[in-house]
Amino acid sequence: MMKQNILGRTGLQVSAIAYGGIVSTMSDYANYTYSGDGQQASDDYVEYALDAGINYFDVAPKYGDAQEKLGNSLRGVREHITLACKTGCRDYDSAARDAEKSLRLLHTDHFDIYQLHALHNEDDVERAFASNGVMRLMEELRKSGTARFLGITAHSESAALKALELFDFDTVLFPTNWQMSMAIGYGSQVIRKAKERNMGILGMKSMIERGFGPGDDGARKRWPKSWCKPFDPETQSQLLLAAMKYARFMNPDTLIPAGDIEHFRFAVQHADEIWNDPFSDQERALLEAHLPEVKDRLFMQ
C-alpha cells in the first residue's frame, strides 16, 4: 500500500502521492487541444489511484471540467478520501458561487481542505483579505463545517509569505522543485515557515524540468495540461526520479504529480523509491550537471 504521512496539524493521514484533479479533465488546457480522456478515462484513473492506496484528491474550478469528471469518479468513496478544492476568486460573492458549484459538482457537503488558489503577488493577497474579500467566505465555511481546514496555493514566494503573515492557514501547496531550488533557493522560506507552524505541506512541480520556451511545441502538445515542461518519463527517467527525490527531501507531506496520467503513473510506480530511499550523492550530481542546461528557463521568477 501507498505510504501515508500526517498532513501537519490537520492530523489527516494522506497518501505520499496525491491525485491532482487535472488528470481527470479533457478540456483545452494551456491553450492546446486535448482530445483524449472522457468520463470513463477519469473513472479508470481514479480506480487505479484508489487501488494504489491514494486517498488525497485535489481539484479546482480552473481545471476545465475536472470537478465534474472527478466528482462522478469519486461517487461512493467520498467518506474514504481526503478531498481538497480551491477557489481562484478574490471577492466574497463570486467565491460563494464558486464554492457552491464545487460542492455540487463534487457531490459532497464539505471540503476537507479548501484553498485560496494561485496567489500571484502581494496585491493579490490584499484583495483576498479585503473587507468583502474571499477570506471572509473561507472563514465562514470553516465555522459552518463546510470546510474542515483552510489552505493556500501559490507560485510566488512573496505572496505566500504575505498570506501566512495575515492568517494562520492549515496547509500550503507550493512548488518543491529541484531547478528553482538549486538555481535560486526558491521555496525554502515558505517551507521553513510552514514547518515552524506545523502546517501541512503539499509539494507541486516536483516533476518539472524547466519553463516552456521556443521549440517546445511538441512537448506542449504531448503534455497540454502542464504550463511548464515536465521531464520525459521515457527518456529522462533517472533525472525525473532524482528530481522527485530532491522534492521529497524538501519535506513536503505529499507530492502532487504533473497533470497527465503518464506522469501520475510514474509517481505511483516509483513512490517507494521516492519516499524510502535516500537522495544519493550520485542523484544530486546528476541534477547539478543538468542545471546549466535549464537554469535560464525558470518557470517562475
Image: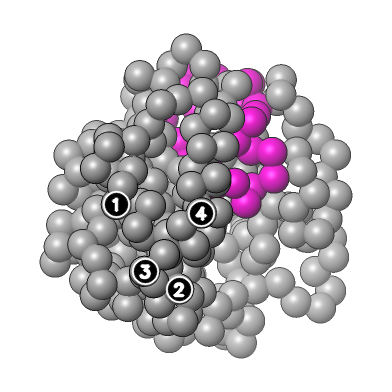
What is the C-alpha distance between the residues marked 2 and 3?
Answer: 9 Å
Q: Classify the position of the N terminus by image quarter.
A: top left
Residue under the point 55% across and 45% down: 97
Q: Name the residue under label 1.
A: 139
Q: What element carries label 4?
A: helix
Disc 3 secondary structure class: loop
State the residue position of label 3.
Answer: 131
The reply, left or right, for residue 228 in relation to residue 111 is: right
**Mark 4 sits on what residue?**
93
Mark found first going from the N terminus, 4 or 1:
4
Mark 3 vs mark 1, foreground winner is: 3
Q: Where is residue 2 in the image (x, y as percent from the top left)?
A: 35, 30
**Relative depth, front residue between 94 and 169:** 94
> Which residue is labeled 2 in the image?
127
| Mark 1 residue type | Glu
Q: Which of marks 3 and 4 is nearer the N terminus?
A: 4
Q: Distance between the residues labelled 4 and 2?
A: 13 Å
Nearest the eye: 101 or 251? 101
Residue type highlighted by circle 2: Arg
Residue at x-position 82% and y-position 45%: 34
